[in-house]
Image (cartoon, rainbow, N blue to C red):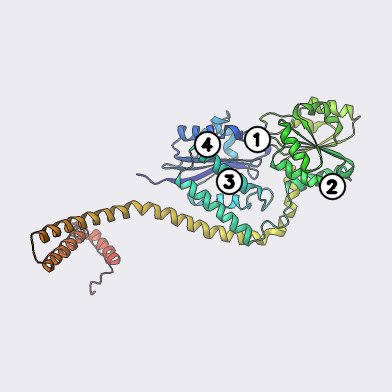
Amino acid sequence: MQTLQLFALGINHHTAPLAVREQVAFNPDRLPQALNDLIRDKPVREAAILSTCNRTELYCAAEHPGTAVDWLAEYHSMPADRISPYLYTFPQRDAVRHMFRVASGLDSMVLGEPQILGQMKQAARTAEEAGTLGTLLNKLFQRTFAVAKEVRSTTAIGANIVSMAAAAVHLSQRIFENVSEQKVLFIGAGEMIELCAAHFAGQKPQRLTIANRTIERAEAVADRFGGDALRLDEVGARLAEYDIVVACTASPLPIIGLGMVERALKARRHRPMVMVDLAVPRDIEAEVDKLGDVFLYTLDDLGQIVEQGMETRQSAVVEAEQIIDTRVVSFLQWMDSREIVPTIRALRDNAERARRHEVDHAMKMLARGEDPAKVLEMMSHGLTNKLIHPPTHALNQAEGGDRAEIAKLLGRIYHAHTGE
């Protein structure tokens, strides 16, 4: 049986622009089927997929590690050479280290941001429910979560985070000096929208509205911030009422198109609008950015804002990297120990068979009335001979350098001193 090897491959905000990242993002509802397709179509035994606004990564265990690049490209109906220039792959040690760094927030657009840990936990749950999370990946994820907790609790990596939500407010204030005088519309009702709504609510806007496909979910979020709710299909007719629009849904297609925004601007008599698109794939058509009265910001634009606060956390990064390096070594040692388990089990089985044979023989001798002391002596000699036979036979059969190596190894195993 061949040993499973770990590898990871992916694309993220460091390696690819938003226009490429959104093409390889996975719809959450289709992830279980995608995982099963990956296991079926490639020589992969275990797999998990992490797909967020800023990254899509595959974590796999296989007997013959492959990049699975072709599968990723085929799944998203795009040529492999389109994605290859932006793709990174990590073999075993580097894959473990990468997962530890990602979960700890060291690879995030916002250094130390905590949302990624929850997203990785969800990736593990999805893989487990899909039946693609085996013993090795399950252990790796659990160790990853433990390392992230240690990094966050013993370093200042998460202190004074400049979040995406805070950056959205900052960009809005560049256009509207007082957010308190503006009306804000949020499209979606997920975690990122809740974070953004919390930050904007702190500025006490004139109106705060949540629009969502499920109106009950929109109402639940709106109630938390003293706002109101809209159905998603009402956005087109009501868009002109809002000065700031923040969108983040899981829709595979844009929700706000160029024509919808043009009609809203006409109704607003070309008063400016700030639009923030936090979704991957994008919720707002890219062509909207060409309109003169719209200030459209994407994830990459927000990333430039949050980078400004990174320098103050560099000392914490050094501490975090040291913790991660130590924990990588520990996990790889655990993996190595798994490889020798079958050998240890086989040795124990052989010894147990020898013991049982000698005990059975001794019991028969005792049943015949033979001297117990003599029986014990014979049993101990018999057991010793059986246990020592394999190594001595191997030593006698070996020649030249092999014999010297075996002799040296047996000396170490049995702490035997030859007197030389």
What residue sits 61% from the left and 53% below the top?
A: 104
Q: Which residue is mark 4?
A: 69
Circle nearer the N terminus (2, 4): 4
- Relative placement, left or right, of 9 versus 273 is left
> Which of labels 3 and 1 is toward the front?
3
Image quarter hosting the C terminus? bottom left
Question: Residue pushed farthest bottom?
Answer: 419
Q: Is residue 88 above or below residue 283?
A: below
What residue sits 66% from the left and 30% below the top?
A: 252
Q: Is residue 227 above or below residue 270?
A: below
Mark pair 1, 2: CA separation:
31 Å
Q: Position of residue 90 (x, y in %)?
A: 52, 47
Mark pair 3, 1: CA separation:
22 Å
The answer to whether residue 398 of the structure is visible from this angle is: no
Disc 2 marks a residue whose amino acid type is Gln
Q: Position of residue 229 (x, y in %)?
A: 79, 34
Q: Position of residue 69 (x, y in %)?
A: 52, 36
**Mark 4 residue element:** helix
Q: Nearer the viewer, residue 402 or 366?
A: 366
Mark pair 2, 3: CA separation:
32 Å
Disc number placed over residue 121 in the picture, else none: 3
Disc 4 marks a residue whose amino acid type is Val
Instruction: Give the crowd class for mark 2: few <14, some 14-19, many >=20 residues within 10 Å.
Output: some
> Which of labels 3 and 4 is toward the front?
3
Instruction: Give the crowd class for mark 1: few <14, some 14-19, many >=20 residues within 10 Å.
Output: many
**Mark 2 residue element:** loop
Disc 3 marks a residue whose amino acid type is Lys
Disc number placed over residue 22 in the picture, else none: 1
- Relative placement, left or right, of 309 versus 81 is right
What residue sits 64% from the left and 37% below the top?
A: 21
Q: Quadrant of residue 62?
A: top left
Q: Which residue is mark 2?
A: 203
